[in-house]
């Protein structure tokens, strides 16, 4: 991917992020943080790519460590968010 | 690195859309659970698409990494107490940060080895390891402070700021070296170590009360680290998802700073709120004016009240009084009163924390009101009960422009007909100043432990009726 294309995605996504997040009510700010935290675990995709190419043992080990850490982030993040959101119930 | 197939790219696009729908779902408690499912589906799709793409050769090692991470993630998520949410988020931020560091390092080493390193890759790798390493060590320190493994107070020493500036400068120099001599991977490792040290030194001067700001900021950094990793790998999904999170963390940081009346710079430098020139002493404010009350008196007040607002502070969570408060709320509702909760943005240890704690005690979210919504209505409130909150209800913030908390947004409980403050003593809050609310004509002090006080009041009401 060309640098300019990457930069375009980056800038547009930041603006989109601002639009989306300003609509989240304060009541949900903690689930927002844990949920967005899980999304930032997307680095897992990069970790899979790095670990799976079999270039050298060092690269593979760095990648596998990254896979494990990012997976904790992803699985734990989404699950704890789900737990929390389940507590927000309606009256009656 | 071999290019991903178009199918994989389209899979990533769908995953990005699911992340966006997921965040959109969080705009209302009703749609939030579904939103979170969208987000996790997007993540699963991204992982599956990546695993099936031709770039992946060795699946066995990956399976081990995924299995270890998934088991630990599930265990942590199911066991954590809601009061410990800030620590958990801090820890997860750190994991995300260090994962990005490892990915960028591995990719840089591989690209150099294969002779495919580009300028974009090298610059992005340097940026990723700096942001990621700062996020990692900074988050660990934040975790330690919140868990009270290290002191929650600001730790500082003369020359700390100068040292940080030197460290940051060194990071820039080493970053430039990694770009000029990418084949010399030693530069990258030194860069990671320096950035890690910087992360420690940036967070240690931050005091415990300012932690919500730091966690929100590190949340943003973990997203930015992922986005920077996307530049390393030329991966659209990492860039999009990382930026969304980066923006989210920045907004929350801003909201927290505003609610605490602090600038981000002051928080990061560990500066306390500047002491006011001529703040009144506690004796002048309180002497002879404070009226103490009892559970029975409060019960009589509440029996005739139509509209009751409870103002929870972190003291409520510390006293584990959420369930007692829920019981009191139900007693009052049975007697025909409406009960609401007025929640200041910094009532908990992280943005929205108090809402989660009350939701856990099965208090419906419709009763949780934010500051801007409830403030104009305090004049119609019969009884406001302040429970474990102090600075956020101090009217001085509105009245005295020289006060350390001048201009800080507060809950206007002093405008309620009667204010009941449940507190152990007249000790000051984080701002270290007396609170004239406690001596106001319409205020009654109930000196007691928060949980016991609520239980006693509830009992007194039930006995009387």
Image: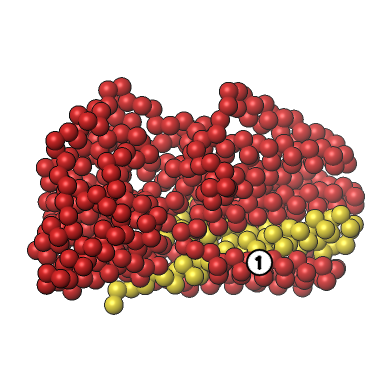
Chain colours: A yellow, B red
Q: Is residue A76 above or below residue A33?
A: below
Q: Is residue A14 above or below residue B33?
A: above
Q: Is residue B8 left or right of residue B303?
A: right
Q: Residue extending furthest left?
A: B304
Quadrant for residue A22, please give it: bottom left
In this figure, which residue is indicated by the disc labeled 1? B72
Q: Is residue B270 left or right of residue B413?
A: right
Asked whether residue B208 appears in the rendered view, the answer is yes
The residue under the point 44% across, 42% down is: B209
The residue under the point 55% across, 67% down is: B79
* Residue B174: image location, x then y, percent: 76, 33
- Nearer to the camera, B431 or B38: B431
Element under disc 1: helix
- Nearer to the camera, B394 or A47: B394
Image quadrant for the N terminus of chain B? bottom right
The residue under the point 84% across, 55% down is: A59
Asked whether residue A23 appears in the rendered view, the answer is no
* Residue B252: image location, x then y, percent: 46, 49
Q: Is residue B403 above or below residue B362?
A: above
Quadrant for residue B163, please give it: top right
Alpha-carbon neighbours of circle 1 within 10 Å: few (<14), some, or many (≥20)?
some
Q: Chain of mark 1?
A: B
* Residue B334: image location, x then y, percent: 18, 74
Image quadrant for the C terminus of chain B? bottom left
């Amino acid at each position: 991917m060309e640098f300019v294309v990457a930069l375009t995605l980056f800038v547009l996504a930041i603006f989109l992020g601002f639009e989306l997040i300003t609509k989240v009510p304060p009541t949900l700010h903690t689930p927002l943080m844990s949920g967005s935290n899980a999304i930032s675990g997307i680095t897992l995709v990069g970790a899979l790519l790095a670990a799976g190419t079999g270039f050298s043992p060092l690269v593979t080990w760095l990648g596998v460590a990254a896979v494990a850490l990012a997976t904790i982030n992803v699985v734990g993040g989404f699950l704890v968010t789900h737990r929390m959101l389940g507590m927000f119930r309606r009256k009656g | 690195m071999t290019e991903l197939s178009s199918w994989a790219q389209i899979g990533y696009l769908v995953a990005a859309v699911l992340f966006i729908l997921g965040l959109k779902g969080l705009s209302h408690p009703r749609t939030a659970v579904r939103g979170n499912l969208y987000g996790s589906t997007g993540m699963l799709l991204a992982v599956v698409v990546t695993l099936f793409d031709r770039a992946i050769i060795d699946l066995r090692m990956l399976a081990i990494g995924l299995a270890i991470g998934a088991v630990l993630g599930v265990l942590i998520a199911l066991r954590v107490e809601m009061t410990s949410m800030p620590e958990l988020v801090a820890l997860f931020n750190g994991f995300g940060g260090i994962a990005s560091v490892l990915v960028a390092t591995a990719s840089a080493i591989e690209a150099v080895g294969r002779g495919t390193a580009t300028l974009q890759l090298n610059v992005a790798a340097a940026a990723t390891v700096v942001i990621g390493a700062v996020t990692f060590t900074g988050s660990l320190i934040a975790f330690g402070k919140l868990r009270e493994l290290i002191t929650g107070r600001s730790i500082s020493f003369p020359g700390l700021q100068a040292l940080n500036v030197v460290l940051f400068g060194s990071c820039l120099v080493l970053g430039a070296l990694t770009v000029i001599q990418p084949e010399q991977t030693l530069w990258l490792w030194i860069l990671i170590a320096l950035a890690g040290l910087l992360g420690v030194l940036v967070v240690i001067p931050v005091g415990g009360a300012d932690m919500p700001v730091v966690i929100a900021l590190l949340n943003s950094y973990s997203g930015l680290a992922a986005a920077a990793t996307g530049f390393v790998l030329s991966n659209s999904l990492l860039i999009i998802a990382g930026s969304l999170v980066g923006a989210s963390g920045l907004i929350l940081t801003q909201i927290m700073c505003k609610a605490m009346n602090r600038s981000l710079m002051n928080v990061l430098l560990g500066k306390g709120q500047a002491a006011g020139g001529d703040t009144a002493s506690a004796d002048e404010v309180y002497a002879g004016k404070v009226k103490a009350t009892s559970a029975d008196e409060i019960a009589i007040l509440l029996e005739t009240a139509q509209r009751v607002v409870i103002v929870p502070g972190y003291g409520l969570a510390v006293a584990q009084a959420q369930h007692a408060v829920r019981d009191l709320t139900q007693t009052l509702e049975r007697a025909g009163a409406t009960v609401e909760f007025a929640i200041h943005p910094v009532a908990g240890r992280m943005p929205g924390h108090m809402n989660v704690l009350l939701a856990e005690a099965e208090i419906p979210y419709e009763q949780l009101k934010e500051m801007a919504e409830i403030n104009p209505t305090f004049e119609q409130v019969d009884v406001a009960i302040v429970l474990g909150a102090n600075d956020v209800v101090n009217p001085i913030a509105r009245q005295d422009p020289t006060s350390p908390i001048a201009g800080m947004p507060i809950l206007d409980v002093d405008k309620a007909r009667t204010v009941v403050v449940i507190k152990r003593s007249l000790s000051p809050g984080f701002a270290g100043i007396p609170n004239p609310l406690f001596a106001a004509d319409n205020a009654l002090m109930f000196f007691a432990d928060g949980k016991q006080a609520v239980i006693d009041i509830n009992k007194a009401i039930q006995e009387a009726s």
